[in-house]
Image (tube, rainbow, N blue to C red):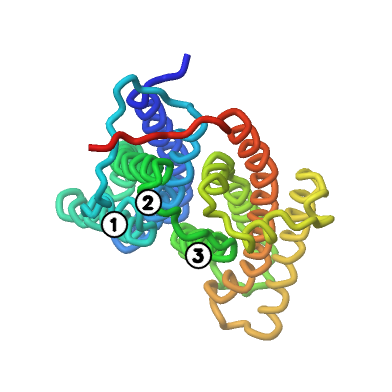
Amino acid sequence: MVPSSSEYLRRRVSATAAVTAVIAAVLVSSLTRNAPDLSIVQAIAGLGMISASVFFAIARDSGGYWFYTIRAGKVFDQNPQWPPDTEDRTWQGMLARSPWLAAVVGFAFAALSCALAMTFVPQHLALYAWCYTLVLLPAATAGFSLLAAHAGAHDALRILGGKSAAPSPHRARRLIAADLFFAIVTNFTLVLPVRDKPAYSLEHGYGYAPFVVAFAILLVIVCAFMIGFASRSRRATLTGELLMGKADEQFIRLAGAPSRWFGVSAIGRYTLYLVSTVIWAALVCAAFEKWAPGAGFVPLYCVALVPLVFMYAGERCVSMHRDLTEARDGERRVLLTFKDVKLALPTD
């Protein structure tokens, strides 16, 4: 039985909040482990970037997702609420349709909450980080998901009813660049506090065996996290973007270009990534020991992160290629199933 829009929305928002809590908990566990004596700056940077990336993803992907949901008939209402003829120019609509503005608001929300925590519980910032992750962030995510859902449904009904032009197309390079930006900056905020831990002390130099081992393990963990997040799917969103013409030809060429790399099994790629990361960690430590013995931990980590960034970008392309294949199939099914169905909005 096809659910009503309110029931479907409730399930979607609940699932989004739950997934956000789980993912954020994994990331915050890294932050609190890397920075046992969590400072206010570290808390704002770490929690702020986590929140910003969540809000950005919701604002960017909701339009395509809800267009697909409505166009594919996944919800049904006996008495639907049709959007007005005028465009939605409220601040809620502007926020829900502006991914970068949403990211700024998400960061500001985390920064403000951390500032309040510093005022009332300055000795328990690590505990507050967990409270924020498990309570405040999921609640904020649920609220913002509702805003984005209403904006996405509003736009979808207007497009399907011929009252609004389709939005400007996405460009694949911009999508990947945005994902890279959040991946790199979030990575820095969560990982760099580790330089204050004894295991990563450079007292004995870059070539000190325990340091090399610890650094290699750190890079392997970072690599695993980045590859895991690079593999996330946007299939439903991409299906909606294809249906509304938001995925341009450049996107399709980049995401759908044939490549031998796409044919390599995931296990084969991941094994290559992990082995090469360990070797790379040892080589970077040896190079810094010889040519830059006093550079410090941050330059070492920045150089070591470079190939991991390329791995992340490559995996995002693989994921886009996979999603595009499935989304095209979904687009064909929707067009065949509803080829004679046209949405007629009521006219006053």
Left or right of 342, for residue 147: left
Instruction: Identify the residue under disc 1.
Output: 105
SS class, disc 1: helix
Quadrant containing the C terminus is top left
Q: CA distance from mark 2 to mark 1?
A: 27 Å
Q: Amino acid at mark 3?
A: Phe
Instruction: Identify the residue under disc 3.
Output: 181
Please report the residue visible at 71 percent of the width from the left and 54 percent of the height from the top.
256
Q: Is residue 123 visible?
A: no
Q: Amino acid at mark 2?
A: Ser
Q: Earlier in the sequence, mark 2 or mark 3?
A: 2
Q: Outermost residue, bottom direction?
A: 291
- The mark found on residue 210 in the picture is none
Whole-percent x, y for residue 241 in the image = 53, 48
Left or right of 4, for residue 196: right
Nearer to us of marks 2 and 1 is 2
**Circle 1: is it few (<14), some (14-19), or many (20+) Cα within 10 Å?**
some
Q: Earlier in the sequence, mark 1 or mark 3?
A: 1
Q: CA distance from mark 2 to mark 3?
A: 32 Å
Please report the residue visible at 33 percent of the width from the left and 19 percent of the height from the top.
78
Q: Quadrant of residue 98?
A: bottom left
